[in-house]
Amino acid sequence: MGIESIIPGATAVGIAFNDGVVLAAEKRFAYGNFIVSRSGKKVFRITDRVGAAFAGMIGDMQVLVRYVQSMVKLKEVDELRSVTPRSVAKLMGVIMYEQRMAPMLTQVILGGVGDGDAPEIYVLDPLGSVIPDKYAAVGTGAETAISLVEAGYKDGMDAEAAVDLAIRAIKSAILRDAASGDGVDVLVVRKSGFDERSITF
């Protein structure tokens, strides 16, 4: 049995816009050439101003999200203030690094609105590396998705333009990556709150 038959494919995209971030991922959950589910959720809220999009093992995503949510909530109660996206990314990176001998098989795009209301995007690999960027794509469809994002990204773009770009990038990856498909979940994070959308096609 090859490694490709046990590690699921996926495509997730994150894009910063003028006052927030867009996080999007397709819905298909597949092991190799077997589709396990057509309605997998790979985009999650972490705090009131931070979310994450994942590619990889669904179970590892869910465990990591629950663990980080609980740790962040304890930190917020202890410090009586909200935790920044950068702090959440660093915490998640430490947790993933601690598991490096039996790594969580997931890649993460974490994004949110930080101090001074600036949008922030971070990419994390299974060993906990934390890389800041303005946009990112992870998963088996990342090469196709990132080409569209790079061609269409502009500094200061508005929310609708960023959402449209993320959806187009994932649709393009779906056409070329058999492990991605069945629609897109989108999470828009602003200081004022979240906007969630689900598109099926």
Image (tube, rainbow, N blue to C red):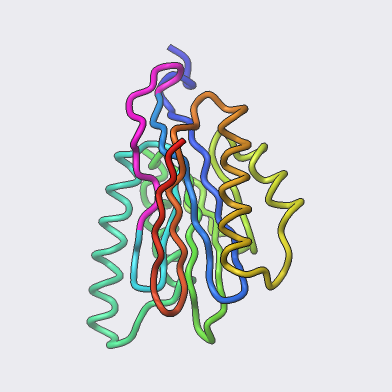
Question: Within the magenta stretch, is there residue 147?
Answer: no
Residue drawn at 43 percent across, 52 percent down: 97
Image-quadrant location for residue 159: bottom right
Q: Position of residue 61 (x, y in %)?
A: 35, 46
Q: Name the foreground residue: 163 vs 150.
A: 163
Q: Is residue 127 left or right of residue 162?
A: left
Image-quadrant location for residue 133: bottom right
Query: Total of numbered circles in the picture?
Result: 0
Image-quadrant location for residue 81: bottom left
Q: Position of residue 49 (x, y in %)?
A: 40, 73
Q: Is residue 176 left or right of residue 42?
A: right
Residue drawn at 29 percent across, 39 percent down: 59
Quadrant the N terminus occupies? top left
Question: Within the magenta stretch, is there residue 33?
Answer: yes
Q: Position of residue 171 (x, y in %)?
A: 58, 38
Residue drawn at 48 percent across, 69 percent down: 112
Residue extending farthest to the top is: 1
Q: Is residue 30 left or right of residue 121?
A: left
Residue drawn at 72 percent across, 44 percent down: 147
Residue extending farthest to the right is: 151
The magenta region covers 31-44
